[in-house]
Amino acid sequence: IQESAEELESLTYEYNNVTASPTAMEEIEALPAQERERINEYAKKLLTLEEERRTFTSKKIRMSDSRFRHIEQIQTEVPDGIRKLREAEDYQALIRSDLSRLDGERHAYEYRRDEQNTIIENSKGITIICLVAMTLCILLLFFLQTLLQIDTQIGYFLTILAGTVTITVLFVKNQDAGKEIIQVEQSIHKLILLQNKVKIRYVNNINLLDYLYTKFDVNHSTELDKEWNRFMVEVEERKKLEENDEDLSFYQKELLKTLRRFHIKDPEVWMSRSLALLDAKEMVEIRHGYIQRRQKLRKQMEYYKGMAEMARNEVKDLAADYPEYAKEILSIVDEY
């Protein structure tokens, strides 16, 4: 009985509200033309604003809230940060190019040094061969002069002349190679010093890039540039959404104030029914929905009334079957 009574109380309250809603609809429809026109204007504004809001909220999310807040906190530094990142990345590419070029030049000089060392080694070998050949020629000429009595003065002259010219040429080449090796070594030393300076710049540049990448939480200047563009669009979209919320709240309050002025029951429900205020078909659909709800509520109420009546009859039967406990049974029922 108690459970049925509680359900009946709840259903009765809802039934009264459902019954009152069609009445409120009739009251709205019966409002003076000027006031109804004002309500319609508010409803049109609300429909437009709700459609705009749906458009805003249905758009693909450009940035997460956390990322948006991060960019928002450093937004004054982002444009300059993009410029610094681009300059640092361009400078890094330039340094790498310089290091590659310097490395190529150093390898070229080292190759040239190896060539000159080879010339020196070859010159030494040819000089030894030349001296051995001169010695053998002189011995041969001496043998011919002594044993065969042949005049070998011209031979001595030609041998000494050829050997002297050859050794002189080899000596000059050896000296030139030695001088060039010294020049090459100096050039290599200068290149190594220059490479070290460029490497220091490279390390400093890498440290700057790491700092900027960490600060802006990106991996490249193009990524920050894209995020900045997305941020600017997102700021504009969020500003429009905020303005939309303010306008929506304003017209909802105005509509609510107008409906309350004419003592319309539960005016809050019309905040989400702007279309029904403008479209008679929609109003009919809502009224039809209320009628169906009222029928179902009435059916539920009848069910719980029957349940309560059945329970009361069971108590009466129980008291009739046990008259000696009738007062006790009724007192227990009275507690509930």
Image: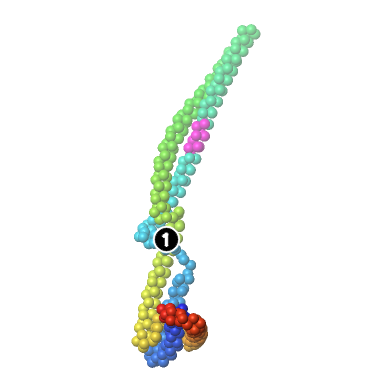
Dominant secondary structure, magenta: helix
Whole-percent x and y of residue 328?
Answer: 43, 79
Q: In this view, does 38 lie above or below 106?
A: below
Q: Nearer the viewer, residue 298 or 86?
A: 298
The outermost residue toward the right is 148
Q: Can you identify the residue that label 1 sits on?
A: 67
Q: Nearer the viewer, residue 44 or 75?
A: 44
Whole-percent x and y of residue 166?
Answer: 55, 22
Q: What element carries label 1?
A: helix
Q: Is residue 157 left or right of residue 238?
A: right
Identified at 36% across, 78% down, the residue is 250
Let me know if residue 308 appears in the view: no
Scheme of image coloration: rainbow
Q: How crowded is mark 1: few (under 14 residues within 10 Å), some or many (20 or more)?
A: some
Identified at 40% across, 55% down, the residue is 216
The quarter of the displayed image where residue 197 is located: top left
Let me know if residue 81 appears in the view: yes
Whole-percent x and y of residue 266?
Answer: 40, 83
Highlighted magenta segment, given as a residue range: 105-114
